[in-house]
Amino acid sequence: MGVLKAIANGMGTTFRKPRLLVILYVINIVFAAAVAFPFFIIVQTELGHSFLGSSVRPVDLMWLGEAALKYGDALPALLGGLLVAALLCLALHVFLNGGVFGRLLDREGRTTLPTFFGDCGRYFWRFVRLFLVSLVFLLLTFGIGLRLLSALLDPLIESAVTEWLPLILSNLHLLAALLLLSIVHMIVDYARIAVIADEEAKVLKALRHALNFLKKRFFRAWAIYLVIVAGTLAGTVVFYAVLGALGGPSVPLVLMGLVWMQLYIIFRIWVRILFVSAQAEFYRSHPY
Amino acid sequence: MKNRIVPASLLGAALLLLPAPTRPWQEPAAAGGAPGLRYEIWVELDSAGKMLLGKEEIVWTNPSREAVPDMLLHLYWNAFKNEDSALLREAAAEGMSGRGAAPDDGEWGWVDITDIRLADGSDLKPGLQFVTPDGPENPDDQTVARVLFPAPVQPGESVHLRLDFRSKVPRTVTRSGYYKNSFFIAQWYPKPGVYEEGRGWNAHAYHQNSEFFADFADFVVHITVPQNFVVGSSGKQTEVTVDESTKRTTYTFRQAMVHDFAWMADPHYLKIERDFIADREVTAQEYRETARLLGLSVEDVRLPNVKMILLIAPAHKGQIERHFRALRAAIKYYGLWYGPYPYETVTMVDPPFRTRSDGMEYPTLFTAGTQILTSKDVLSPEGVIVHEFGHGYWYGLVANNEFEAAWLDEGLNTYSTARVLARAYGPGAPPLVFKGIPLSWLLRIPKNFDFELNRAAAINNVRYDPVTAWSWKFYNSGSYGANVYMRAATLLSTLEGLLGEETWARIMRTYHMRYRFRHPGKAEFIGVVNEIAGKDMTWFFDELLDATQAFDYGVAAISSVKVPARRRGVYDANGAREEMTSKKIADLEAEQAKSPDRDGAGPAYRTTVVLRRFGEARVRGDAQVKVLVRFKDGTMETRSWDGQARWARLEFIKPVAAESAQIDPEGVWLIDANLANNSRGADGLRRNVVKLMTQLLFTVQSFLHFVSSWS
């Protein structure tokens, strides 16, 4: 199967299973609202009755300076809270991945809350183990691979005579990091797919399936990943261009801005589902 | 040509050739006489060995009524000699690390006086010793040395010193130094302190959080470098001599009435000259408006032409016009507001790569700072160009002691920078960069005015130090920067609001022109403020600059209640006693409401506004806390509160309820730590608050989605 066909088929699957998107979006917004709630309280308390509330901008130094003064001492607790929220979110999505992968790989099956969460539970521990394996991959990638690259580039950067060389090399380093990260993500995604598609109970075996699969068609698989990333970036550019045009505090503009931002979040969640479904299509078209 | 040392006898003749600032508005005599200090320096750069070899002649005239037995000399480069210098110890104490905190092995710098004599040949070297004028904290610091004279220098008498010095150029730690074949040379020559009658020599060690202080002098400096080097320097280049046999070139620069001299050399730099032509930059209307504002004639505010010299790295060639545009704006507005630029030249140096010499001022020369990728939304390099040129006014011309009153130059100049940038460019986006790429290329980053950033930093650092602390005695570098630069600037903006635009403009102009070529301190500045304002504003400085207390007045509550026409209780009337019950009152009011012949007077409302002083700082003098209350029928009422107590309750009886109450409705008190509590409205959520919340929600959603992608 070609790259574009895999993506097109993946898209078809996502459109056939819109409830996945709904479930993930609802979880995202509820979780986010819970995390943001203390900030809402602060904003309302400080600005809800103040004239400053009529002129305040999203990044307003006049008010941010005051907020820093008033709540600066609480910053460690605030960051700690955010860290806990992030870890909870991570754990939650390790759990939800079971439902996403399970439903997408069950072509004919319906997506209902029982089937979705049933898959979440069914694959949870295997996905936890795969998550831990992905941490090892990340450690190898960033702890060793990128350090080796740095060791190679740093002497060149150190001996530069103009800014160009450090600029180019540090951005190449970043690009390498992102590409390596995409490969790690891709390998783990295919391992998850293998767990379900090959009904593999052992995650290391599933990982081996994935690696064997990728060994034979690495660049096509990677191209699927990169094409979707490119599409996401294009969507992001459009999003910010439109969002910029929706400036202003009038009620219709605020509402349109809100809707547009939520559409973008939905788009990004859809992209996440598309990654899985396109890769699943590609995997299934080349049986192990 | 290695030994092209001009004989000392020619010193006087050479000084006669100085490009003195002789325009009528800044005649040195009018500013306190010709400088009592003259330098002639011959310096040769050994670019391979990273060494400077120098000879220096100093003629110092005792300006006091005291006999002076010695002289304190700054040897600033010894700050880079070892980790026991005040500079490096203070950097280490602040937890600084890496090359920004100390040179690496083999990259240290130092300066040695190898010979020092009087003009008659008397050897002063045996009496030369390092001293620590700032106390025992840094006993091994070698940045100040004392030289004893054979006999005290009598009042009005001159002493003529001849020095040989040898310096190792450091790999740059703070501004002075080299990277590969690029050199930025500042604070490099043995430099006397400032003699203050009754106090002696004012000289301080080179500290982490301080800049410099020196006397106005006439300079002649001969700089010898390899022939292929481009040189930029303080002063005006007057001669160039090429020695083909040694492949070396000597440039001579001269400048009168400056208190420091810096230079740079690099083999690859571009040197571009342009003219600031005043009549092209300033319209007749601008001259008239400035003259009216300052109460001067148009001739008094007319600007001279200035030669602008830019030394820029070839990699930044595309930014030449940006540099000149910013410099033109700075020359124009500083000139119009504070006084004409008195020197013939100004040299702007794009600092050599990795010399860490960006953003620094020296008389008639300053360093800017940019990067190869820039954004039009970000006022960089504009901000640093305006600021560092501005130091030519606040530090260069009005030369306060930067060790002891840094706010007088940094604060006044940060305030001035914000005004120039706002006038010439408007708001700018913050210079956020990732991997050398401006983030404003990728994201829509909100723009802000400098005064907003200044205020945000100011209110968060009030608690650490007074603005007026001595530079190296601040809590840390953060407090030094925030208080000396940003809080001082915010307080000056506040003072401007308090005194009004015209009075303030005249204060700044008067202070500048009166103290040009002098060393004023806080008392002189306050003196001008009081004189021009026509009232004693000393309280403002006592309360807000010398103290560490927050200024925060706010509206704590606002409420409107209907005033009852009748009150409950037992009343005596016509010898009888009657109880007015709730039911009676309700019945009477119902009857009155039905009555066709009511006089049309509706119910009255009692509005109560509670004001609070949340901070320790108070308004004083004739200043008051102004409160504006708006009512639902569109009427407004303004009251004043003296602001001395912790709170005040104001009452208003009106036919309608109140809509809002606002303290400081004209926005005078920029230093107020909480502008959000300055107003309180009866209505609830405001549209921008809703918008803020939607964006906050979106940000958290995006963050969580990003986190989930790692699962």
Image (cartoon, rainbow, N blue to C red):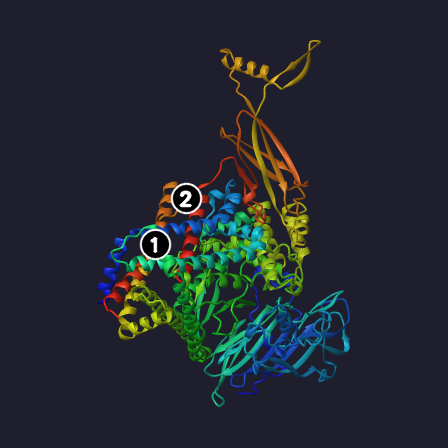
Q: Is residue B160 left or right of residue B306?
A: right
Circle on res. B667: none
Q: Residues within 10 Å of mark 2 (few under 14, many from 20)?
A: many
| Residue at x 44%, y 59% (from the top left corner) | A91
Image-quadrant location for residue B140: bottom right
Foreground of the two, B643 or B402: B643
Q: Label 2: which residue?
A: A249
In front of the other: A208 or B543: A208
Residue farthest bottom in this picture: B245
Alpha carbon distance from label 2 to label 1:
40 Å
Q: Which mark is residue A116?
A: 1
At mark 2, the secondary structure is: loop
Q: Is residue B20 left or right of residue A261?
A: right
Looking at the picture, which amino acid does disc 2 mark?
Pro
**B214 and B117: which is toward the camera:** B214
Q: Residue at x 68, y 41 (%)?
A: B644
Q: Subunit of mark 2?
A: A
Q: Residue A244: in sight, yes or no?
A: no
First in sequence, mark 2 or 1: give its number: 1
- Residue B189: % across, % down: 61, 77
Q: Counting other residues with Cα less than 10 Å from the Cα at mark 1, is it few (<14), some (14-19), or many (20 or more)?
A: many
